[in-house]
Amino acid sequence: MSILSPKLIQLVAIMSDCEFHDGDSLGQKLKVTRSAVWKMIKKLSDYGISITSIKGKGYKLDTPLLLLDPDSIQSALPSALNNKIKLDVFETIDSTNTFLKQHFDSNKISICISECQVGGNGRFHRNWFSPFGINLYMSFRFRIQKDISELGGLTLAVSVATMNTLKKFGVESKIKWPNDVYCNDQKISGNLIEIFAESNSTADAIIGIGLNINMDEIQTDDKLHWTSILKETGKIADRNKIAATLISELCKQLDLFSKTGISHFLNVVHESDYLQNKQITVTQSSNAFKGTASGIDEFGRLILTLNDGTTRHFSSGDAQIKR
Ligand code: BTN
């Protein structure tokens, strides 16, 4: 685990023009030695960033890159939010969700973001692919005055926040029950929620969101159905602006969820239900149920019409579409 260093952020900002910069001039601009510059270049390249290095010319980023910057994120947030959140931005971490299990401020919304994760977790103990510098891996820890039984639809409120954020950056998406956001039949984001219930109808929730931003085919040979903002728009997006938008959307939607529960979200969830009327298989433990997805009920559960015409409501599970 290491905190993202302001010098590394500055170095990448200078090199973001994808032109050659020599070690001496980079050192002067950053007020560090040439060998410190070399170490930072080496570190970036160890993280998988492609850099051309030519003797006498210096170093050049092969593709545009801008690192996350806590100051940029904070200055893009509505000012009312700034003293309500505690933000930590890391260069590398095991998992942002795991970090917030130990490190949080119970009087604030604690947020952890990292440039990469070495042990990123997805649902069902899957690994969440978390390469350096191109996507968003963010976790949120907050306290909610609700009983655990009322938190069933929380994941849908999180997906609404993600969907609203994507829309602001020109990407139309849909919610795939229970935890995903899809775009043109491909996954663009997933969330992983961990709840720590207390006895007095209060719970602490850790919400982890992975959002694919500037990832393209070159960064992964993964043949799964995934997409990213870059793939959808053809443009590299500013991850600091997206992080700030997602933070403020989440604060807004989580506040609404605390006040109204899932009821406020049902309309938008119905309108944006990716699975609606699709032939799917829902897997729960080792049981698989085939049928037609028939909406989301008032508790945020998926309604499945089985082939014999009867319906079943699922509060959790994995939904696979017949492609
Ligand atoms: C899924 O679709 O399976 C959920 C993926 C959740 C990934 C995010 S990335 C930030 C946070 N930290 C983790 O280890 N996981 C979540």
Image (cartoon, rainbow, N blue to C red):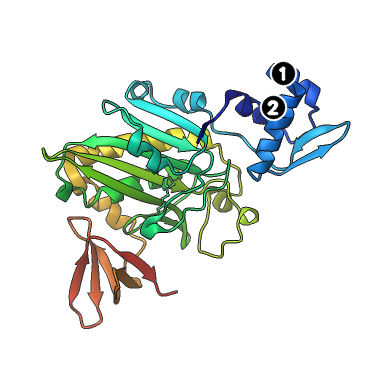
Residue 64 visible, this orientation: no
Question: Percent from the top left, x then y, of residue 135?
Answer: 53, 44
Q: Amino acid at mark 1?
A: Lys
Closer-to-camera residue (188/134): 134
Q: Nearer the viewer, mark 1 or mark 2?
A: 1
Closer-to-camera residue (157/136): 136
Which of the 4 quarters of the picture holds residue 55?
top right
Residue named by callout 1: 29
Residue at the left extreme?
Answer: 200
> Which residue is drawn at the image coordinates 32% and 36% (left, top)?
141
Mark number for residue 162?
A: none
> Which residue is drawn at the image coordinates 58% and 34% (left, top)?
67
Which of the 4 quarters of the picture holds residue 97?
top left
Question: Percent from the top left, x then y, of residue 170?
Answer: 49, 45
SS for callout 1: helix
> Which residue is drawn at the image coordinates 57% and 61% (left, top)?
222
Q: Amino acid at mark 2?
A: Ile
Residue named by callout 2: 14
Question: Percent from the top left, x then y, of residue 296?
Answer: 24, 60
> Which residue is drawn at the image coordinates 49% and 27% (left, top)?
70
Vertical arrangement, residue 277 with respect to residue 247, above or below: below
SS for callout 2: helix
Closer-to-camera residue (41/220): 41
Q: CA distance from mark 1 to mark 2?
A: 9 Å
Give the left or right position of residue 110, taking residue 243 as reference: left
